[in-house]
Amino acid sequence: MDYNILAKKAIDAKAFAYAPYSNFHVGAALLTKGGKVYTGCNVESAAFSPTCCAERTALVKAVSDGERDFAAIAISGGPTGADYCYPCGVCRQMLYEFGGDNLQIIVVKCEGDYNVHPLDTLLPHGFGAKDLSTRED
Ligand code: THU
């Protein structure tokens, strides 16, 4: 899929953000290897720590729908023209769980303006299933 299209879906997903505390709206669009797209937004909580980032919202939607193989995720955060929004450490770890080193992270500034980073450049030496001997599937 053209990353411009995926980037636009991330921008559009911001419309659903529930972010009354930070007022920082984030949208994400996660592309499966089969070509499906799952979008997500950030969902905040008055207790703050239960807040779910847009990336994890999209990931959990996809995994709960049976998807486990992902090619790319586009992320757009903040108002139009805001700087690139990079995934937080927790999201990098969760994306690594299913995307591995080669998941393409597309940080979007606005339509037509994005940068692509393979996940291993944002999370070097990631810890994952390969490091555990207890994994069964
Ligand atoms: N947030 C995301 O959804 N994704 C990111 O990559 C960075 C941060 C959210 C969490 C919180 O709702 C708000 O942005 C401010 O941190």
Image: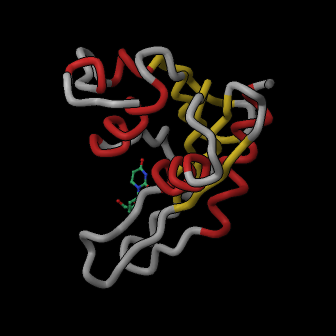
- Residue at the farthest bottom position: 46
Q: Is residue 81 left or right of residue 86?
A: right
Q: Position of residue 9 (x, y in %)?
A: 74, 47
- The number of discs equals 0
Left or right, 89 with respect to 101, comes to left
* The C terminus: image quadrant: top left
Identified at 26% across, 22% down, the residue is 126
**Spot occupied by residue 16 in the image (x, y as percentages of width and height):** 64, 69
Q: Report the residue at 36% width, 79% height from top.
A: 45
Image x and y of residue 109, in percent:
59, 39
Residue 108 visible to the viewer: no
Task: Judge whether 54 appears above or below 88 on screen.
Answer: below
Quarter containing the N terminus: top right
In screen coordinates, is 136 left or right of 2? left
In which image quadrant can residue 106 be found?
top right
Can you see residue 59?
Answer: yes
Give ligand 1's quarter of the image. bottom left
Could you tell me which residue is drawn at 35 percent across and 68 percent down? 51
